Image (cartoon, coloured by chain):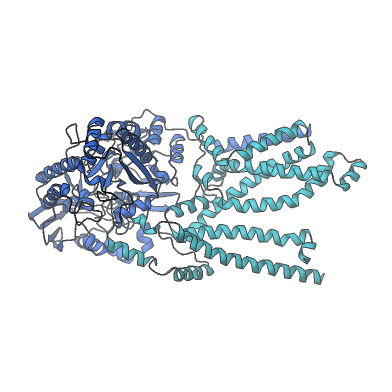
Chain colours: A blue, B cyan
Amino acid sequence: MKTRRTIAAIAGLVLTSLLVAGCGSTGAGDGDASGSVGSDASSIQKGGTLIWGSRSEPGNGGLDPYVASVYRSTAVLALTYETLVVKNDSGKLEPALATKWEQPDPTTYRFTIRDGVKFSDGSALTIDDVVWSFKHHKEVNGAGDEALANLKDIKAVDDHTVEFTFTEAVPSFLNLISRRTGGYFIVKQSWYEQADSKTRQTQTVGTGPFTVEEWNHGVDLKLAKNTHYWEKGVPYLDGIDFKVTGGDEQTLLSLVQQGSVDAAWFWDSELAAQAQNAGFTKGKDQFTSARSIWIDPNYGNGALKDVRVRRAISEAIDREQLIKLGANGEGALSFATPPAFNELAKPNDSTPYYKYDPDDAKKLLKQAGADNLTISITYGSDASSQTDVAILQLIAKQLSKVGVNLKLNGVPYSEVQNVFTTGADFPSELVWVVGTKGADAASSYHSWLDDSGKVSHWQGNADAEKAKSILAQARKETDATKRAKQLDQLNTEVADKVLILNPLATPLNTQLWSSKVHGFSTDSEDARANLKYTWIEH
Amino acid sequence: MPSAFRAYGRYAVRKLGSTVFVLVVLSLIVFLMVRLVPGDPLAGYYDTQGIPSDTKIAALRAQLGLDKPWPVQYASWFGALLHGDFGDSLTQPYSVGSQIAKRLPYSIELSVLSTLIALAIAIPFGLVAGRREGAWQDAVIRACSFFAIAMPSFVIGLAIVLTNSRTLRLRLVGAVSFAQDPFDNLRLMLAPALVLAFPFAAELIRYLRANVIEDLKRPYAVTLRAKGLTRGQMVSGHSLRNSLIPLSTVVGLHLAALVGGTVVIENVFSIPGMGQFLIQSINAADYPSVQGAVFVIGVIFIAMNLVIELLYPVINPRIGEV
């Protein structure tokens, strides 16, 4: 009898604990999925804090605008600092801190700075801050500063005008400095110079719509509204709280399902779909991430030197199947420049060797005497790359149908990084690279195609000569329309000679929000630029 | 008495000396171990979107002291450690000490809470199983214990979180510090603590059961039974007390192991404790953070061991004389 009482008491204790653990639940955001873009001004509710769930917090370099370069840092910096100009979703330049810009001659750019702009600490933005921001950027990055490497001089013409002079034309200049997450931010000189390294990495004094209020590492990053923001009436939110789950997206999904976050971004499209099932609205897919396979034609016995072999591999890849099965439908055909470059043409049925044609692939392999080919591909096999692993397994299966044995060589992603950061030798014929839309389409080609690029393996290869020549022209072309045409031509030429393999592009991440969030939409840089127009029901 | 004190003093000094030696060796192993793992802390500055220039990377390497030989780096780190300074993170803008100070309370709380729950479950069930050896109660308790031991705690955790996500949608995931909101903190900590407590409780039940069964067969127990004490009185009055001494050793060591051993559960329930900190630091090849975290976890384990070893002579005076 006493034993029964004991067991009952303990069972009661456990049950009570579970109930206590559960009480105060907030329920799920199971609204009508109407988190719409664009809001009727009269219905906008100002104030409130948006809770945004994320698996990670800012990375190396924290929030120092001159040190941080990884996306999880720059995506926050883009909300707290601003650039002179920005690009809209059509790829057209728009004013930001500069209201006007002109190019009086091929080597000179002049910008008129917006009047009445203040930093988040209430101090006025001066022309000296603008000049210093660019000078300091060049000082930190040296010759590797793509936009400013050829800068001859930057000076304040008057209190509102800044002028850049280059030693030669830099057609990519405006593209590079207009990228929201590109790092060409305008920073308050006196604050930056006085602050110590830790302060620069944990606090911000910018002109953006938000400013950092508090960063609890591993827990959350809180942004507060910049009350001095120059654009009248925005931001609507009082703040944004980026909740960090610590690397596990399943946990992030749980936060979505239990209603603990208002919005979230997922790298795993399957989990994003589950968040959508929980009532969250999925933002428009911006195909900013090109999944590319870089080729070293000279590796091993040089089987990939033969263009017929490369063409056969390209034709043996069923891209539609990869998009449907490998990427859960969240993919698109892609060149080396991902489809988010809206000013460029997209691949289509007439793109050379993109259409799935296993019979022709077999024929080409036979002609090349490579009908029993074995090649390897190296890829990052970390837990965060599971989607890529599924795609690669599918590619290996597809290639096996034409007699190509593709060996999958999974290594820690840091080893893959060595290839494109330090220019280390390829560990196999092929290397899987998860690319992201850069600031300038021509720059996407430079590192692996141009002979001066860090990763180039096409020196002296006749197949690449025409592509290199088009790239050289595009890099010098100052007329944006002509440049876009050259880049389209380059994409077609690269596809024809299969100098790189581009199975598909996917969104860098999938952004979702609950039904009480309004006015938010994704942007072509995945920079969450529309958070300043976002409001929340409260 | 004075000679007993002297013996205990010698014993304590010997144990303390060996502990200091173990800590120095631990610091060296930890330091070298993190450098043997492939990965460059500066790799985290690279991104396919924005690749920092070589100038910038070289400057960062020098600034972080990574361009110096490892013995110099070790001497500098260990010297600072002796002053209680764990150094700064290589990849994030914080001092390692401040992060440990923020995260350790979560892990300690989780460990203590799960240990208390485990004891609350284990003591009554262990005693019942021991007292009713061979009866149906014993069979049921043993079966449940086997199941709880065999089932990894993270599987139970995931099952709870996933089931909850599809049904009740209670707020089970996340963490709030005790200082911020004690009630919310305990509410959120309870589910992971329960998940950790079940397998631990199962182990303790088996341990306690075996102790009680053995104790009840001792001559003194037979004598007391002959004098009229019931099995229940024997268990609650004597066997429990006799079992608590070895049980406290097991609990102490397990408690220390839990502080760094809750990595998966911390991830499942999004608790920013030491385990999560360690994993994040390893992934980022953040040497000082990994060194600091492993060292502190090691110190806790060693300290627990030391306390237990220093308590042995108190429990059994013959140990100190050896």
Q: Nearer the viewer, residue A522 or A388?
A: A388
On screen, residue B261 versus residue B2, left or right, reads left
Left or right for B152, reference A49:
right
Q: Is residue A187 visible?
A: yes
Q: Position of residue A327 (x, y in %)?
A: 34, 35
Q: In this view, does B9 lie to the left or right of B152?
A: right
Compare residues B144 and A480 and report the one nearer the observer: B144
Q: Quadrant of residue B12 in the image?
A: bottom right
Determine which quarter of the picture holds residue A405: top left
Q: Position of residue A221 (x, y in %)?
A: 40, 50
- Would you place residue B190 above or below residue A185 in this image? above
Point out the residue furthest to the top here: A32
Measuring from the top left, give residue B67's x and y in whole percent. Answer: 38, 67
Question: Is there any visible trace of residue A24 in the rendered image?
Answer: no
Q: Give the residue at x 22% y 59%.
A: A145
Q: Which residue is drawn at 75% across and 31% down?
A: B136
Residue at image location 17% in from the left, 38% down from the top = A345
User: What is the quadrant of the C terminus of chain A in the image?
Assistant: top left
Total labels: the figure holds 0
Q: Residue furthest front?
A: A369
Question: Residue A251, how many percent across, how many down?
Answer: 46, 40
The image quadrant that residue A396 belongs to is top left
Image: A463 above or below B10: above
